[in-house]
Image: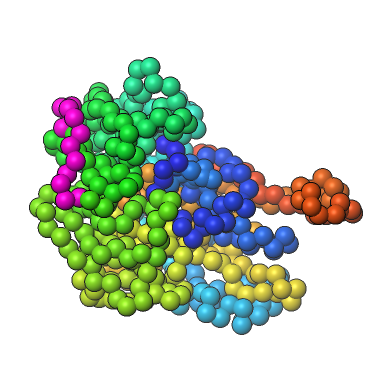
Amino acid sequence: MRDRNEEDLVRALRGAADDAPEPVGDLPTAITERRRRRSHRRARSVLAAAAVLVVIGGGTAVARDVFPSGGGEGVSITGAAADPSSPVADPSEAAGKTPEVSVDPVAEVWPKAVSTIPAKAADGWKYRPITGLSATELLLTAESSFEKAGRLEVYDTAARKSTVLAEMPGPPGVKGYFVQGVEVGADSIAWWGETPNNRDEWADFWVVPRTGGTARQVGEVTGAQAHVERIGVTADFVFWSVRAGGVYRMPLTGGSPEYITGTDGLHLLSWPWAFDVANGREGEDWDRNQTKLFNLETGQTTVVNAPDGARGLRCGPAWCFGASGDESIVQRTDGSDRRTLPGLSNMMEHTPLAGRFAFFSLSGVTGRDAAGEEIEDAHAPLAVVYDPVTGRTAGVGKRNPSGGGGIGTGTSSSPTSIIYWDEDRRQVEECKVEDVSSVPASPRDPAPTGKTRVCSTTEKGGGKELTVVNLLAVPPTE
């Protein structure tokens, strides 16, 4: 699965992607929360492998281990201590920049939700998490090559074994075909595919019983109908919304696509819900608030009550997350139970994960040293998951001692229940001194002379196991 049409889960990092190094390895949403101390580059690289690559895929895993190997004590973000070997931090630099919340390791907050799985199948194909099927079952794709999904598998975290659910063939005679978003329904699992490297306006849909079997092509679409952004599946139909807005359906038995009257400007969220903001596509006004949820089964509309000053409000069936000023806010769709989340403002997913949880990246900066360089807590998590039901905040992802790291989310069409990372993968900064003449410069500038220090970041290690957090394993009342 590629990230070319990914669910842009990192709006805050998009602006930095152009400055980030080429993605290394096969990690879906890698973020570097490090502002390079020596080069002063504030690049946050997003390495995903599902859609854009660096684009990186709309949510595939990336390396992270977050807490020290002996850990267990959790991290108080407000009072994170700097490395004692570093110069004393200037408290004024950290003031107002760190969350006034206590972040404990996710393995302590929700121990039943955390597991490790192999990074590869027995035949060497790489696994990419999609979403949870239950508290102990993970849906995965196995890739024969980068982003080339070839089959669906289910990994049982209790039994610690995988089962092949179905092969994912491409349509005969179609070159450059890539599987895109996979969606889990009550009875079936569906996905769509396209040929992203040519200019064809074409897409197709496939379905397989949830219990497994032989996948079959439901049908093909062309033109504007092929601008698929998300899909849904029921016992009788595959549904999809297009980037310009509007929802279509096609019988699972095959047939012509049908436009659903009354869905102008709507976009699928997770069946049967649609909303009135695009799913993170280019050109969408990120500050625009969602105003409603529409139930495609019942025709019922739920009005979202956004507070004055809110921006970027996005809602699932129950909970909404957005921003107000420099802080994030959480509320129910009717505006009740509203609260602020101090210090948590950089959302990595704008719609709630698993319909309930918020996902934020997290800076580990605790201040600056005497030379003005940022000091980071290497034990701080890369990101946090916030549960509005209990108010608990769990740290996820592994931060390298140098401050970098990566983390990703599952690649399901609907908002996923999975967050994952490779705890053994690390980002390493390597520097060397070169003649400035070897460094690209504008032809309008005078020819440079002398020496300069050039640094680059590469990813090393990993590739054996993925740490997976399955939010379906968090009890609904916990």
User: Where's residue 432, x and y in %?
Assistant: 80, 50
Name the foreground residue: 225 vs 220. 225
Q: Which picture quadrant has residue 4? A: top left
Residue 417 in view in this figure? no
User: Where's residue 207, x and y in %?
Assistant: 24, 31
The magenta stretch spans residue 9: no
Q: Which picture quadrant has residue 338? A: bottom left
* Quarter of the image where the N terminus is located: top left
Residue 83, compared with residue 49, is above or below; it is below
Residue 224, compared with residue 272, is above or below; it is above
The magenta stretch spans residue 252: yes
Q: Along the horizontal axis of the image, is 163 left or right of 400? A: left
Name the foreground residue: 194 vs 121. 194
User: Where's residue 134, x and y in %?
Assistant: 25, 46
Q: How is the image coloured?
A: rainbow
Residue drawn at the location 18% of the way across and 30% of the way down: 256
Please state the extent of the stretch shown in magenta in the rendering.
251-263
Residue drawn at the location 12% of the way across and 58% of the way down: 300
* Quarter of the image where the C terminus is located: bottom left
Residue 447 in view in this figure? yes
Name the foreground residue: 415 vs 277. 277
User: Where's residue 24, x and y in %?
Assistant: 59, 42
Q: Along the horizontal axis of the image, is 308 left or right of 461? A: left
Residue drawn at the location 26% of the way across and 35% of the way down: 190
